[in-house]
Image (spheres, helix red, strand yellow):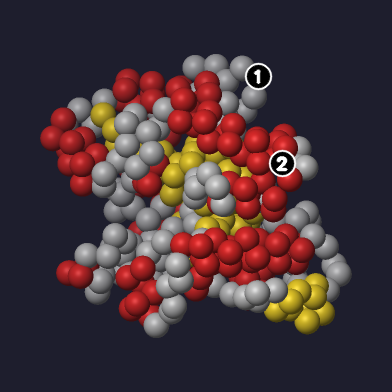
Amino acid sequence: MKTRGRKMEFGAQVSCYRNTWDSIANVARMMDAGPWDSIWFADHYIPPPGRKEEEHLTAHEAFTVAAAVGAMTTKLRIGHLVLGNTYRNPGLTAKMAGTVDHIAHGRFTLGIGAAWFKREHEAYGWTFPSMKERQDRFEEAMLMLRDLFAGDDSVTHKGAYYELDDAPLSPGSYDQPIPILVGGTGEKRTLKTLAMYGDIMNVDGWAGGPMTAEYFHHKVNVVNAHCETVGRDPADIRHTILIPTMVTDDKSAVRAFIEGRRLGEGSAAGPKSYVIDRIGEIVEAGAHEIMIGGIPTDDPDAYQLVAEEVLSQF
């Protein structure tokens, strides 16, 4: 399937939960040796969605995982889908991002959102503010991150929630400002914050939105309108989408995958031809990159199957 003269990029969201570090590392090595362009990790302290009986299961810390993967790979871009701002001080986040970007020789993308998972805040003693305050905090944090990544100058900031006093970022970005991916598609606040300070939009299929060209175009149009309002060139922003994917002819497995995770219309779960069609719809819609989600880390062959049978079509 043609991508009309442009190189289509594909990544995978690799789970940090209910698994072992060795399984994550095996998948990262396999992806780095294959046709994949990027690898992404979620950021939660207990396995989402927060079932009490699963809270004791593994939830690897996402920044640590990114640093380790940055050191053991050579070509994959590395990022998060996405970090939660409420439990990550923006100054510390920038410091960690700069270090990981140097470990990975410029391959790191900072993916961050306003946070949503109330139970992990309760478990670890963090305040879970109202939606408005989380969005206010997120917008302020994005301004700080953008300023810190911009160059060699120290940054002073005195805001409603965060402060910096002539703070340097060294090491900062490796060779160019670390790109910032904004997680979330809230049209009033999140996408406006993206238009103001972000570089990459990501439509998250796990959130239940329909994985269709129409939905994707709608969100892009919202971002473009915000860009016009804030004086930003819409061409500065890349458009990406995370698509939950399962390649199988087993109809009961597909039903369990979709219903169990409350996925939206058009999720790429089903026979190979159906998955190719769903991903092809988003390719033709103009996405710059598609991240595949839901491939089990305990089955590296499943990543190979998706690469050989699906991604090769694009």
Name the residue at 66% across, 69% down: 94
Please report the residue visible at 47 percent of the width from the left and 25 percent of the height from the top: 213
Along the line of sight, the residue nearer the viewer: 312 or 240: 240
Task: Say which quarter of the image contains residue 5.
Answer: top right
Q: Which residue is mark 1?
A: 5
Q: Which mark is residue 229?
A: 2
Does residue 233 appear in this view? yes
* Vertical position of residue 8 compared to residue 158: above or below: above
Marks counted in the figure total 2
> What amino acid is found at the position of numbered circle 1 in the picture?
Gly
Q: Residues within 10 Å of mark 1 (few under 14, many from 20)?
A: few
In what element is the residue under mark 2?
A: helix
- In the image, 77 versus 221, the foreground residue is 221
Q: Amino acid at mark 2?
A: Thr
Image coordinates of residue 96 in percent, x first then y, are: 62, 71
Q: What secondary structure is found at the residue carrying circle 1? A: loop
| Percent x, y of residue 249 | 20, 28
Between tags 1 and 2, which lies in front?
2
Tell whether label 2 touches label 1 (CB within 8 Å). Answer: no
- Horizontal arrangement in the rendering, residue 152 relative to residue 278 (left or right): right
Residue at the spot 25% in from the left edge and 71% down from the top edge:
55
Q: Residues within 10 Å of mark 2 (few under 14, many from 20)?
A: few
